[in-house]
Image: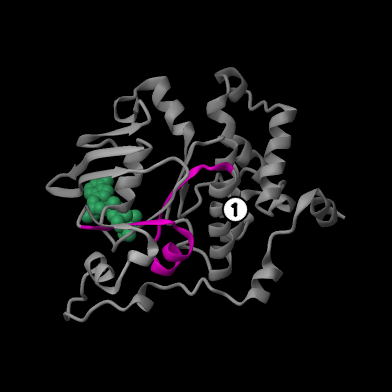
């Protein structure tokens, strides 16, 4: 994916200011920066939830920023989005929520009638198993914990068979244990399927632990772009700036301590396979 001079202006405010980036397929990228830096706006422009004021987005030969109609919908299918607030339909059961990820793959008639094939249902259960939440399949989505809901949202994204996953603060509402499970799931999708994952994160330690490339934004501009080991104290300072008393930022201020003890992580690891489904319903 190639962004060229991508800019978004809201009234008098420039949310994203002439961003130029090249993101090779299969990279795991973390975007960091303080509140208002333009991270969400940048991500939303990538899948065309928000239109750019100027500049272009290309995906290979495809000019994403010029797509309309059916082609735009196809792009949005290729580009799955994960949100901080999960965006499931709370009154629908988990399985239906996951099947909704197939909607853009289907004819309107099938969609309107809410008919899903046997293959699609099997695919949905497999996606839920992969995220360790298959036992919730028949539960209403609104009754799940935040961590479970985000895992269902990732399962739904997988059903889109996306080429890219864009995640906007996917762990900001989660406790450290669920944050780890969700980040592990994103890493797994990136590593196993080679799908590009671009995620906004508000904690530096998570970006360092999971992302091979970190992009730092400040005031709508890219002020850092490099590997985690290149993110020095000075670079952090430039991204996050000083507080209003002029004191420098301390990296622990942007830390979630996702590095939980191994035993606790093992205890919470999603159960695996269809056996777990049977066990849960027994
Ligand atoms: N729809 C909108 N209308 C007007 N201004 C907006 C809109 N969306 C974003 N902005 C402004 O653009 C700037 C960048 O916002 P954005 O949401 O992209 O920041 P962010 O880096 O995601 O912040 P946060 O970490 O708080 O999520 C902010 O000043 C914000 O107020
Ligand atoms: Mg944001």
Give residue 39's position: percent from left, percent from top. 31, 53
Give residue 6's position: percent from left, percent from top. 23, 40
Q: Residue at x 28, y 35 (%)?
A: 51
Check the image and tell me how it is coloured.
Answer: one colour
Instruction: Count up the numbered dots.
Output: 1
Give residue 192's position: percent from left, percent from top. 60, 46
Q: Residue at x 60, y 60 (%)?
A: 145
Q: Residue furthest left?
A: 12
Give residue 65's position: percent from left, percent from top. 30, 30
239 lies above or below 220: below
231 lies above or below 197: below
Question: Is residue 262 shown left or right of residue 49?
Answer: right
Task: Say if residue 122 shows up in the picture.
Answer: yes
Q: Cβ(mark 1) to ligand 2 < 8 Å?
A: no
Q: Nearer the viewer, residue 69 or 246?
A: 246
Q: Residue furthest right?
A: 282
Residue 208: name its quadrant.
bottom left
Task: Tell me where the magenta segment starts and ends, as one range.
Answer: 193-218
Task: Say if residue 90 shows up in the picture.
Answer: no
Secondary-structure class at tag 1: helix
Question: Is residue 282 shown left or right of residue 79?
Answer: right
In which quadrant will I find the N terminus?
top left
253 lies above or below 111: below
169 lies above or below 209: above
Q: Nearer the viewer, residue 46 or 216?
A: 216
In which quadrant will I find the C terminus?
bottom right
**Does the stretch in magenta take in 177?**
no
Quadrant of ligand 2 in image? bottom left
Which residue has dot 1 on it?
A: 151
């Amino acid at each position: 994916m190639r962004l060229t001079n991508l800019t978004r202006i809201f009234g008098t405010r420039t949310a994203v200011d002439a961003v130029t980036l090249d993101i090779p397929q299969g990279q795991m990228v973390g975007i960091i920066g303080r509140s208002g830096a333009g991270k969400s706006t940048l991500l939303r422009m990538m899948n065309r939830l928000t239109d750019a004021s100027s500049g272009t987005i290309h995906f290979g030969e495809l000019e994403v920023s010029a797509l309309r109609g059916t082609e735009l919908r196809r792009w949005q299918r290729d580009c799955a989005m994960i949100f901080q607030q999960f965006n499931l339909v709370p009154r629908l059961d988990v399985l239906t929520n996951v099947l909704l990820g197939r909607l853009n793959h289907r004819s309107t008639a099938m969609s309107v009638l809410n008919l899903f094939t046997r293959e699609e249902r099997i695919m949905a259960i497999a996606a839920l198993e992969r995220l360790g939440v298959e036992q919730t399949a028949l539960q209403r989505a609104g009754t799940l914990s935040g961590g479970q809901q985000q895992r269902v949202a990732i399962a739904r994204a997988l059903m889109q068979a996306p080429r890219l996953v864009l995640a906007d603060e996917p762990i900001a509402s989660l406790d450290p244990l669920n944050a780890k499970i969700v980040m592990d799931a994103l890493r797994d999708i990136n590593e196993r399927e080679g799908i590009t994952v671009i995620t906004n994160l508000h904690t530096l330690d998570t970006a360092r632990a999971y992302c091979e490339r970190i992009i730092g934004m400040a005031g709508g501009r890219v002020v850092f772009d490099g590997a985690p080991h290149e993110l020095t104290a000075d670079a952090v300072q430039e991204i996050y700036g000083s507080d209003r008393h002029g004191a420098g930022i301390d990296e622990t201020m942007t830390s979630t301590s996702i590095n939980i003890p191994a035993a606790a992580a093992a205890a919470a690891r999603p159960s695996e396979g269809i056996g777990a489904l049977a066990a849960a319903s027994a």
